[in-house]
Image (cartoon, grey):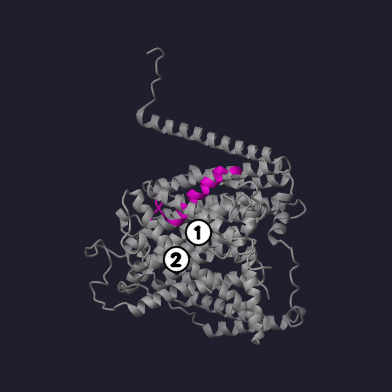
Amino acid sequence: MSLAQIVFLVVAAVILGSALLVVTTRNLIHAALWLIVTLFGVAVLYALLNAGFLAVVQVVIYIGAIAILFIFAVMLTRADLRDRAPQLNRGWWLNIILALLTFGGLIWLFQSWTGFSKTAADIPAGFDAVAQLGNALISPTGYLLPFEVASVLLLAALVGAVYVAFSRK
Amino acid sequence: MSWWTDPVHTIAAWLTTLLTGWGLPAWLASLIIQFLGVVVLVSLLMLLDIFLVWVERKVVARFQDRLGPNRVGPWGLIQPFADIVKLLIKEDITPAGADRVIYNLAPIISLMSVLLLWAIVPLAPQILGVDLNVGALYIIAAGALGTLAIIMAAWSSNNKYALIGAFRQVAVLVSFEVPMIAVMLIPTVLAGSMGMNAIVQAQNVPFVFLAPLAALIFIIAAIAELGRSPFDMNEAESEIVAGFHIEYTGMKFGLFYAGELLHAFTFGGFWAILFFGGYRFFGLETLGPLVSAAILLAKAMVGYWFIMWVRYTVMRIRIDHMLAFNWKFLTPLAFVLLMVTALVNAWLRNSNVLIYVLAMLAANAVIGLGVLQILRNVSRRDREKVEGPSQPVAAGQ
Amino acid sequence: MQNEWLYIGLFVVVGALVPTAAIVLSWIISPKKPNPIKQSTYECGMETVGDNWVQFKAQYYVFALVFLVFDVETVFLFPWAVALGKLSVFAVLEGIIFILILLAGLVYAWRKGTLDWV
């Protein structure tokens, strides 16, 4: 097994394990910290795939902004940070069976895909991912309209957040 | 590829032949060599960190008109080593009710986030950890990890003053990241790439002459990011003693402190890389990579001295003034600067270098004067609200 | 597999090991004599007064929220900035429209008083 495969398996185990801990741990701040581990694992996956820009963007936005927002929200709303409710559903064994069936079904569906047994082609040398992304975002035949609409979307998010946070003023 | 012109690759090639001669597969040999490279760099950084403690104490002493440490060793050079030994043998007191795992993890993540930054610092074109093409965002990502460490430290200390200090510090940190990222976009636009080495190579004219306001905004935002005075909300010593690291003793506190100093030096280095030409200095860098590294470290030390100068001169700013300064002044200014720089760059990109530089300087001057005029009008309006309209001076009296 | 991120991964590992080694060394060498007074929470030398949990100002959350929107905006601007060198003035204008829309949002938040501390 190559180094990339070993690293992938370790990272996948870390992501799944910490995701499970996010939903089962009783302490809310610990849950937020396990979420950060999960998001960091996803960033490592992006780096494994040579998507460097996405890896740093994942860390900057998810860990640097969204996770901190989660922690602030938790600290803002709860005096008692331990979750007293039962951590598992009543029919949890049925849910596990359904999840395993779904997973098995997906594996069976993907068996016919040749991508599993082929390694991806190497990225051509001199391919500047960020510059290509920039070109695509700007060009009128590319993603120019979604680019500008994204800014309107962000404006809507900001206005909505201000309205919700300050509607009592 | 001789020893002087390409030391890192020469040593790596020699080690590769040695290791594969011992029968290791090629990928394992290259992994071991990279690991050794990282270990050497981190060791040199920790040594530099110790030296920075001495520099900091001597400089603060001179600013305060006293001598600083001069007993232990010549000029007090052994003092930081004595400090380290003292911190190591101090008792490690964990407060009751602290969350032990997070409590121990926070200083580790804090120092790790600073060490991570050195992976992309180009000491020379040939002495470079990794030439990431997303270098500018990587700096912000490492800063995000540092912010996380502060929250973890404060939360796990089970101390309300630590929490207050940390909330304020994190609010300041995240707020000042916005103008910092916006200003880091300016060297990116001027150089056409986010990679640190590419930005240095593009600085035939150092970017401080093309965007002086951007350099100023960057260093202000960087000082806020570092948590140093005049923005040191976390260590407002006269207000909340030591902020988020109140409950830390011994070496863990030492790690926070050393991390802060190294962080300041690192940002001095990034200021030099982004705006002052990095390892370039009128062609001296072609003499060899070690000369380039020395040039960059010297510029970083000058940047660090500037940060210390600001720290020991300016008083601490109140938190609401700090945040108002950021959101109402720095952020709009940074974005306006970005727009104007991008416009002038696109318009005059292909013309004479002198015209380009003068046009950029003129644009910066216009923006600067406009901002000053706006500030004057705003403060006059505020003053008139408090004092009443100012009487016009009668002529001839 | 010559992935440049491998170097960063090694940096993370070594960067985590060095402070851990320092802490472990300190733990080995230092004396350990815990007693309840030493371990009590620090409050400028007095006994702690009041709850250990402080009411968190809602304003921190608002600042983090505004920061999130501007963070995403600047992340969108990075590919634009990198690609700008070879494109025409039209591309610059598109980016300027993007920035202006978000500056309008900042002005809105400013006028609504969300950027004030009190």
Farthest residue, direction bottom = B23
**Dot 1 crowding, Cα within 10 Å, few <14, some 14–19, many 20+:** many
Q: Specify the amino acid type for callout 1.
A: Thr
Distance in Å between CA atoms under marks 2 and 1: 18 Å
In this picture, residue B192 sits left or right of residue B108: right
Is-magenta flag for residue B222?
yes
**Residue drawn at (37%, 75%), measured in percent from left and top?**
B100
Q: Quadrant of residue C90?
A: top right
Give the mark toward the camera: 2 or 1.
1
**Residue drawn at (52%, 58%), measured in percent from left and top?**
B297
> Where in the figure is residue B24, as x and y percent of width and height?
65, 85
Image: magenta residue range? B209-234
Please tell me if label 2 and label 1 are on a single chain: yes
Which residue is denoted by mark 1 in the rendering?
B266
- Residue A121, label in figure: none
Residue C37 showing in the rendered view: yes
Quarter containing the C terminus of chain B: top left
- Residue B149, label in figure: 2
Q: Quadrant of residue B235?
A: bottom left
> Where in the figure is residue B122, as x and y percent of width and height?
59, 60
Q: Specify the amino acid type for callout 2.
A: Ala
Query: Compared with residue C57, is residue B21 higher up or lower down, i.e. above or below?
Result: below
Q: Secondary structure at mark 2?
A: helix
For mark 2, name the chain: B
Q: Nearer the viewer, residue B240 or B85?
A: B85
